[in-house]
Image (tube, rainbow, N blue to C red):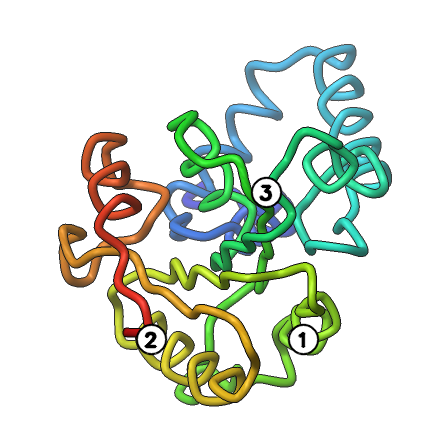
C-alpha cells in the first residue's frame, strides 16, 4: 500500500493546528493509531473535550480561564487603575510570569490585520472601552512590534486619545517583529519600566 488514506481524516484535523503541515499531521495520526492504546486515546479525547467545554473567555478582560470572572479580575489585591492591553492570553501569561506588574489586563484576542480579514470589530475593543471609566488612570498598550501589532496600537491610541487617561506603550527595548510571549523576562521588565506615555 503506497499511502495511508484511512488516516486522511485524522491527519486533516491535525493540519488545523498552527505550524502543523501535512507530514507532521500524518505522523501524529499514525502515532495515535499505531502507538497509543484504546485507553490512552479515550483519555486524550476526554481531556480535549473537557478543556474545550470548561475553558472560556473572561467576560471582563477576555482572557482564557476556568473561573468566571478570571482569577486576576476577581482579585482584590490588583491595581485596578492600570489596564495593560495585549494580543491574547499567552502574552498575558508572559507578563504575569515576570512578577513585576500588579495591574489589570485586557486580551484583544487578536490583532488588526486587514490582509487576514481581521478588523477592529473582530477584537474585544468594545469590551475594553466599557472598562475605561474614572477608576482607570493608565492604559498600557503592549502589542507586539509587528505590522499588525503596530497597526492595532495606533488604532487604540487614536480612538482613546480624548479620554482622560494616560496611554503608554512598552519601551522600545523589545525587538522589532517580536511576539511578547517569546521575549525573555529581562527584556520585558526593561520594556515595562521604560514605557512611554502620550501625556508629557
Q: Earlier in the sequence, mark 3 or mark 1?
A: 3
Q: Quadrant for residue 122, please give it.
A: bottom right
Q: Quadrant for residue 16, please give it.
A: bottom right
Q: Nearer the viewer, mark 2 or mark 1?
A: 2
Q: Residue at x 81, y 55 (%)?
A: 59
Q: Residue at x 73, y 38 (%)?
A: 65
Residue on which disc 2 sits: 198
Q: Nearer the viewer, mark 3 or mark 1?
A: 1
Compared with 96, 125 (above or below) is below
Q: Residue at x 38, y 62 (%)?
A: 143
User: Which element is circle 2 on?
Assistant: loop
Q: Nearer the viewer, mark 3 or mark 2?
A: 2
User: Which element is circle 3 on?
Assistant: helix
Q: Dot 1 surroundings within 10 Å: few (below 14), some, or many (20 or more)?
A: few
Q: Earlier in the sequence, mark 2 or mark 1?
A: 1
Compared with 80, 129 (above or below) is below
Residue on which disc 3 sits: 7
- 13 horizontally vs 181: left or right: right
Q: Earlier in the sequence, mark 3 or mark 2?
A: 3
Q: What percent of the width, then of the height, locates residue 182?
A: 29, 41
User: Which element is circle 1 on?
Assistant: helix
Q: Spatial distance from mark 2 to mark 1, Cα to Cα?
A: 18 Å
Asked if disc 3 and disc 2 are in contact, CB closer than 8 Å, the reply is no
Q: Spatial distance from mark 3 to mark 1, Cα to Cα?
A: 47 Å
Nearest to the observer: residue 93 or residue 15: 93
Compared with 168, 46 (above or below) is above
Asked if disc 2 and disc 1 are in contact, CB closer than 8 Å, the reply is no
Residue on which disc 1 sits: 129
Q: What percent of the width, then of the height, locates residue 120?
A: 57, 84
Amino acid at each position: 500500500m503506497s499511502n495511508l488514506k484511512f488516516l486522511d481524516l485524522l491527519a486533516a484535523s491535525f493540519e488545523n493546528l498552527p505550524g502543523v503541515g501535512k507530514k507532521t499531521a500524518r505522523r501524529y495520526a499514525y502515532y495515535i493509531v499505531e502507538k497509543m492504546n484504546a485507553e490512552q486515546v479515550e483519555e486524550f479525547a476526554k481531556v480535549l473535550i473537557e478543556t474545550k467545554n470548561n475553558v472560556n473567555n473572561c467576560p471582563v478582560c477576555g482572557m482564557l480561564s476556568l473561573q468566571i470572572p478570571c482569577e486576576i479580575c476577581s482579585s482584590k489585591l490588583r491595581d485596578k487603575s492600570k489596564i495593560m492591553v495585549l494580543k491574547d492570553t499567552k502574552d498575558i501569561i508572559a507578563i504575569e510570569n515576570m512578577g513585576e506588574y500588579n495591574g489589570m489586563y485586557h486580551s484583544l484576542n487578536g490583532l488588526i490585520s486587514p490582509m487576514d480579514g481581521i478588523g477592529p470589530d473582530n477584537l474585544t475593543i468594545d469590551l475594553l472601552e466599557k472598562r475605561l471609566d474614572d477608576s482607570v488612570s493608565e492604559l498600557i498598550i503592549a502589542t507586539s512590534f509587528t505590522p499588525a501589532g503596530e497597526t492595532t496600537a495606533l488604532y487604540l491610541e487614536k480612538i482613546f486619545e480624548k479620554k482622560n487617561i494616560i496611554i503608554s506603550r512598552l519601551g522600545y527595548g523589545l525587538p522589532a517583529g517580536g511576539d511578547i510571549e517569546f521575549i525573555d523576562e529581562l527584556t520585558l521588565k526593561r520594556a515595562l519600566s521604560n514605557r512611554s506615555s502620550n501625556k508629557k
